Image (spheres, helix red, strand yellow):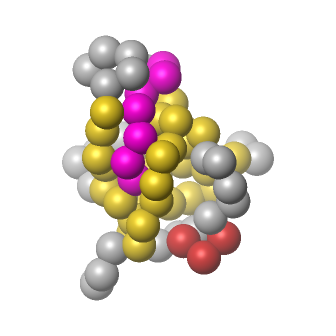
Amino acid sequence: MTMRDEIVEMGLLVRDRGGFALRRDGGGVVRLDLPRTPVDHVEKRVRVTGVYVADDLIEVEAILPLDR
């Protein structure tokens, strides 16, 4: 992974230190830089698309709920 790599990650959207993070299905947690507050998706499984802007930070372009 290099900076500005486009990604698609899936996992659980959680609140994290005044912001939001994704607990990835593949393990680990990554912070999210979101354009808006995704209140409908908190504590639910989501698909996040965006780009890495740091090792542990994704600049989110879209966030969508995953079907159960």
Q: Position of residue 49 (x, y in %)?
A: 38, 48
Q: Position of residue 26 (x, y in %)?
A: 23, 48
Q: Using the rendered image of the protein, determine whether residue 24 is visible from the camera's viewpoint.
A: no
Residue 44 to residue 14: above or below: below
Residue 43 to residue 3: above or below: below
Which quadrant: the N terminus?
top left
Q: Residue furthest top?
A: 2
Query: Would residue 12 be found to the left or right of residue 6 on screen?
Result: right
Q: Is residue 37 found inside the magenta-colored segment of the image?
A: no
- Residue drawn 31% across and 15% down? 2
Residue 10 to residue 67: above or below: above
**Quadrant location of residue 66?**
bottom left
In the image, 13 versus 64, the foreground residue is 64
**Quadrant location of residue 45?**
bottom left
**Quadrant location of residue 29?**
top left
- Residue drawn 46% across and 54% down? 62
Q: Position of residue 30 (x, y in %)?
A: 46, 38
Query: Would residue 8 be found to the left or right of residue 63 on screen?
Result: left
Q: Residue furthest bottom?
A: 68
Magenta residues (range) = 48-54
- Residue drawn 39% across and 16% down? 3
Which quadrant: the C terminus?
bottom left
Residue 16 to residue 37: above or below: above
In the image, 68 versus 65, the foreground residue is 65
Number of marks drawn: 0
Q: Using the rendered image of the protein, determine whether residue 41 is visible from the camera's viewpoint.
A: yes
Give the main secondary structure, helix, strand or loop, of the magenta stretch: strand
